Amino acid sequence: MLANKECQAALEVLQESPLYDCRCKRGMKKELQCLQIYWSIHLGLTEGEEFYEASPYEPVTSRLSDIFRLASMFSGTGADPVVSAKSNHCLDAAKACNLNDNCKKLRSSYISICNREISPTERCNRRKCHKALRQFFDRVPSEFTYRMLFCSCQDLACAERRRQTILPSCSYEDKEKPNCLDLRGVCRTDHLCRSRLADFHANCRASYHTVTSCPADNYQACLGSYAGMIGFDMTPNYVDSSPTGIVVSPWCNCRGSGNMEEECEKFLRDFTENPCLRNAIQAFGNGTDVNVSPKGPSFQATQTPRVEKTPSLPDDLSDSTGLGTSVITTCTSVQEQGLKANNSKELSMCFTELTTNIIPGSNKVIKPNSGPSRARPSAALTVLSVLMLKLAL
């Protein structure tokens, strides 16, 4: 498209318009139409294929903390370790789905479609199976779907149930494994599949600058992007029934890659050796999330010592009952060290307290700028008057 100068000029104009920055919402009513608009603009601005493409979806800003807490009840976190070890959390997740009408209905639908044999040579209708799976993962709340996909396992039976969640014999496996780059090429001819793959790379691409190895330390964004690819040509799944070693992959390999083998291996490792995806799956199964605290000097500015320097005091200085411990401490320091008065509120209160103690009932307030030396003659005169009275008696 860039070879056409008129087309290139038109695209450059679009780059300056709000349309260039628009994004789509996964599962929206006109998702396909929105994605077609997005790719019609962005594909025309690149020469050849890029390894990683920007996601056409709006970024995920929410966290998985609430869902993690629910998952912890099923994974046995905080419960008796003996009971937790014997529990099949993937079976518990399936039971929880059956208690929800919407989850039960859509799960039963895709199980029925994906298990329906067409002929002795054709085990099922993969296209219909994929469509039913997409409906399940797009329409059922993630608190149900994630429990089934990412449940933690302690034995082979549980791990095999987890692997069988998407009915892989129909939705995932095939007679032969295609080359991963060829599979990616097929996926990118479909706007939906291309978008879900780009979203996966945007949210699950391993980052070595974060605590979790995930972009922005957001587990939810990665798990949501992974689930979003199920039901397309690039459908991923667990490669075996290992309860501890979590390895997922699309149904492909890198045989016959020729001089593109390095690129193919890199693409495949984004699934099979992805620390972000592995950490996200394990964290969900354990019911935990990363606690990301603010960094930098802004966090230190919220500490309490600054508040202690300005104690809460009443505006009415004549109310002696309102004097706090911090003021008394300040006044003691002034008396002991003979500090000179300044314009601070604490010392103003201090001189008020000292004056009212020396002359009980006096409402006279000695201002800080008058200095402490003016308070001493009053005290001396008072003491002298008392001595003279005693001598007279």
Image (cartoon, grey):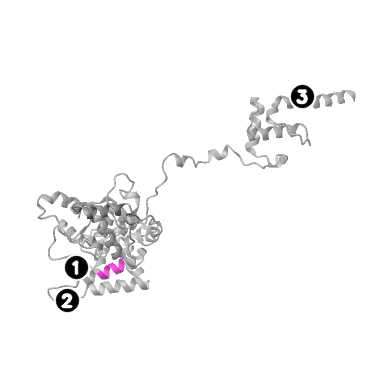
Question: Residues in magenta?
Answer: 131-137
Q: Is residue 244 visible?
A: no
Task: Note whether residue 217 is visible.
Answer: yes
How far apart are the alpha carbons under marks 3 and 1?
101 Å
Q: Is residue 300 magenta?
A: no
Query: Residue 212 placed where, x, y %?
Result: 32, 49
N-terminal-most mark, 3 or 2: 2
- Secondary element under disc 2, as helix, strand or loop, is loop
User: Is 37 on the left-hand or right-hand side of 389?
Assistant: left
Q: Position of residue 369 (x, y in %)?
A: 68, 28
Amino acid marked by disc 2: Ile
The label nearer to you, 1 versus 2, is 2
Q: Total of numbered circles in the picture?
A: 3
Observer-nearest residue: 271 or 46?
46
* Residue position for label 1: 169
Identify the residue position indicated by label 3 in the image.
Answer: 377
Question: Marks 3 and 2, how far apart in space?
Answer: 111 Å
Q: In the rendered image, which quarter is residue 393 located in? A: top right
Identify whether 299 is placed above or below 372. Answer: below
Whether the residues at callouts 3 and 2 have beta carbons within 8 Å, the answer is: no
Q: Which residue is mark 2?
A: 118
- Residue 389 in which image quadrant: top right
Residue 136 part of the magenta segment: yes
**Residue 246: percent from left, percent from top:** 25, 56
Q: Earlier in the sequence, mark 1 or mark 2?
A: 2
Q: Which mark is residue 25?
A: none
Q: Quadrant of residue 187?
A: bottom left
366 to 257, vertically: above or below: above
Residue found at x 16% / y 50%: 263
Q: Secondary structure at mark 1?
A: helix
Horizontal side of 298 relative to 268 (left or right) equals: right
Tag 1: residue type?
Ser
